[in-house]
Amino acid sequence: MADVYRDPRLRELTGASVLVTGGGGLVGSRIVAQLAACGAVPIVLDRFDAYPQPVRDLFRVDRHGARVVLGDVRERATVKWLTGRADYVIHAAAYADVAACTRRPDTAFAANAHGTQTVLDAVVASPVKRLVFVSSAAVYGDGTPAGDGVVRFSEDRPLNPISVYANTKLWGERQVRLMLGGSGTACSIVRYFSV
Ligand SMILES: NC(=O)c1ccc[n+]([C@@H]2O[C@H](COP(=O)([O-])OP(=O)(O)OC[C@H]3O[C@@H](n4cnc5c(N)ncnc54)[C@H](O)[C@@H]3O)[C@@H](O)[C@H]2O)c1
């Protein structure tokens, strides 16, 4: 077993039920594999319509698997049922193609804003201990040059989304903090760069 899985902080994941929205996608499927390697029990909710089958095969998440639910994050009853049985939620489902979001802002809004709100509504009313929101470095825009003229990205840099996609991710971040801050559910936000 790789050393990273021996990190004592990961012990509480042993046997824990972790709902991964978008777990059938590029990033989500890697999260699912890492969770399984930690001894957690990942449960996937995904529409499974972002890729053709040969690509899905590469991600190795069987959409007919026992812990895989074919569905949309906007389906309230499904999300409520799943969060009611989860210890943790990693919300990675999104319309994640930046150019496609610009062409189809309505679809971006539906998946990334409406979908995120549905997940948050369910999590607030559930026993989930922590929600992790998968955001994007796109919230920084092109970045701002430091004094030496070099553009560096760090968490204290100004946020300047310059695309429909980035707007939806920043809205998601703020909505997570608004709805879960001060609630019984902890939250974390991670900003991936290009994967
Ligand atoms: N890939 C990157 O470089 C990158 C960088 C920064 C952030 N992210 C974030 O990581 C997450 C995953 O992105 P990805 O690159 O793996 O994209 P992806 O398209 O490979 O995965 C997204 C998954 O979400 C699913 N999905 C989309 N809308 C859904 C809905 N309404 N209901 C249920 N499932 C739905 C898709 O079917 C897909 O399997 C997203 O939140 C994205 O914003 C990705």
Image (spheres, grey):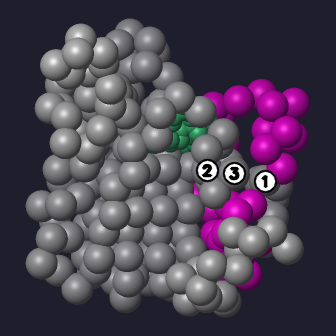
Task: Mark 2 and ligand 1: say if the CB distance to the nearest ligand atom is below 8 Å.
Answer: yes
| Nearest-to-viewer mark from 1 and 3 | 3
| Disc 1 + disc 2, Cβ < 8 Å | yes
**Disc 1 versus disc 2: distance between alpha carbons?**
10 Å
Residue with the mark numbered 3:
29
Q: Helix or strand or loop: what does disc 1 sit on?
A: loop
Describe residue 154's horizontal placement relative to residue 38 as left or right: left
Describe residue 52's horizontal placement relative to residue 115 as left or right: right
Q: Can residue 38 be seen in this view?
A: yes
Q: Tell me where residue 186 sits by quadrant.
A: bottom left
Q: Residue at x 61, y 44 (%)?
A: 27
Q: Tell me where residue 80 sits by quadrant.
A: bottom left
The disc label shown at residue 28, or none? 2
Part of the protein shown in magenta: 32-60
The disc label shown at residue 98, or none? none
Q: Helix or strand or loop: what does disc 3 sit on?
A: helix
Q: Where is residue 58 in the image (x, y as percent from the top left)?
A: 85, 39
Which circle's residue, 1 or 2, is located before the other in the chain? 2
Disc 1 marks which amino acid? Val
Q: Position of residue 46 (x, y in %)?
A: 60, 51
Q: Would residue 102 be counted in the magenta stretch?
A: no
Residue with the mark numbered 1:
61
Disc 3 marks which amino acid? Ser
| Disc 1 + disc 3, Cβ < 8 Å | yes
Q: Helix or strand or loop: what does disc 2 sit on?
A: helix
| Nearest-to-viewer mark from 1 and 2 | 2
**Disc 2 versus disc 3: distance between alpha carbons?**
4 Å
**Disc 1 versus disc 3: distance between alpha carbons?**
7 Å
Q: Residue at x 40, y 51 (%)?
A: 190
